Image (cartoon, rainbow, N blue to C red):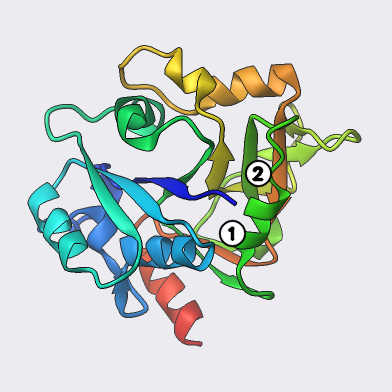
Amino acid sequence: MIKTAMVLAAGHGTRMRPLTNDRAKAMVEVGGKPLIDHMLDRLEEAEVERAVVNVHAHADHLEAHLRARKSGIEIIISDERKELLETGGGVVKALPLLGTDPVFICNIDAIWTEDRPYRLGAMSKMWDPDYMDDLLLLAPIDRTLGYHGKGDFIFGYDGHLYRRGQLAEAPYVYAGVQIAKLDRLAKQPLEPFSRNRIWDETIKAGTIYGYPLDGFWMHVGDPKARDEAEAKLIG
C-alpha cells in the first residue's frame, strides 16, 4: 500500500477568480468543504499516512487551515512562495520530504463520486513496482463534468497507456491522481516543468498504466464548474 502522497496545491487559481481573490484555489469550497479536504479525505480512506502539500498563493491561509485539520494524516508543507514550479518541478523540490518509495501525486481540482467505495485504496493494491513506473487514475470521458477536451489516453492491447495522438477522441481523461516512482523525477533539474515530461518517458518505456475510475469525475477549474460540481454532489 502507498503510504505517502504529494498534493499539488500551489497554483495561482487564475481561472477560478473571483473565488480565489482572497484564498488559494485549494481552499475553494465544493459541497461544504475545501477542495484540499476532498483530496486529503480520499487519501485517508486509502490509508495514506503522510501528505506533502506544496503552497504558493495565499500560502499562510492554506497552511493555517491544514494545521487546524483534525485527522490522522500527517501534513508536511513544501514551500513554493518564491517560485511556482508546476506539476513536475514541484515534486522535484519536495523529494527530500517524500522519501524514495512510490507515492500518490494528486491535483486538488479533481473530485469524484464512487460507484464502489475506496477507489484509491483499490488503485494502491493494483500498483506493481516490478513493471510500473506510473499508474494513472483515468475517468471515462462520458462520465465527466467540467472537462471540455477530447480525452487524453487509450489503453493498448498490452495494457499500457498511449496518448490520443491523431485520434479524434480518446476514451479516458487523466483524473488528477497517479501513483509514481520517483526515480525519473530525481534525475530532473529543479525548474518549472510539467509531469508530461516524465509521462513521455514512461510511455516510450512501456511502464505507464491506467486504473479506470468507477464513478463520476469532476474537474473543478472555474466558478461555473464549481457550481456544477456542487449541484452534482448535492443532487
Amino acid type shown at disc 2: Gly
| Residue 145 in view here | yes
Is 179 in front, or is 87?
179
> Who comes first in sequence, dot 2 or dot 1?
1
Is 143 in front, or is 50?
50
Displayed quadrant of residue 181 = top right
Q: Residue at x 68, y 44 (%)?
A: 127
Amino acid type shown at disc 1: Leu
Q: Residue at x 57, y 42 (%)?
A: 179
Q: How crowded is mark 2: few (under 14 residues within 10 Å), some or many (20 or more)?
A: many
- Kindly indicate whether the residue at mark 1 contacts the one at mark 2 (C-beta within 8 angstroms): no
Q: Residue 42 carries which label?
A: none
Query: Residue 92 placed where, x, y %?
Result: 36, 25
Q: Mark 1 points at which residue?
A: 120
Q: Residue at x 41, y 27 (%)?
A: 88
Q: Is residue 196 above or below residue 170?
A: above
| Residue 58 in view here | no
Circle 1 sits in a helix, a strand or a loop, which is it? Answer: helix
Circle 2 sits in a helix, a strand or a loop, which is it? Answer: loop
Query: Residue 136 placed where, x, y %?
Result: 62, 43
Q: Residue at x 30, y 47 (%)?
A: 9
Query: Residue 225 placed where, x, y %?
Result: 41, 64
Q: Is residue 179 above or below residue 32?
A: above
Query: Residue 69 placed where, x, y %?
Result: 23, 69
Q: Name the residue under label 2.
A: 151
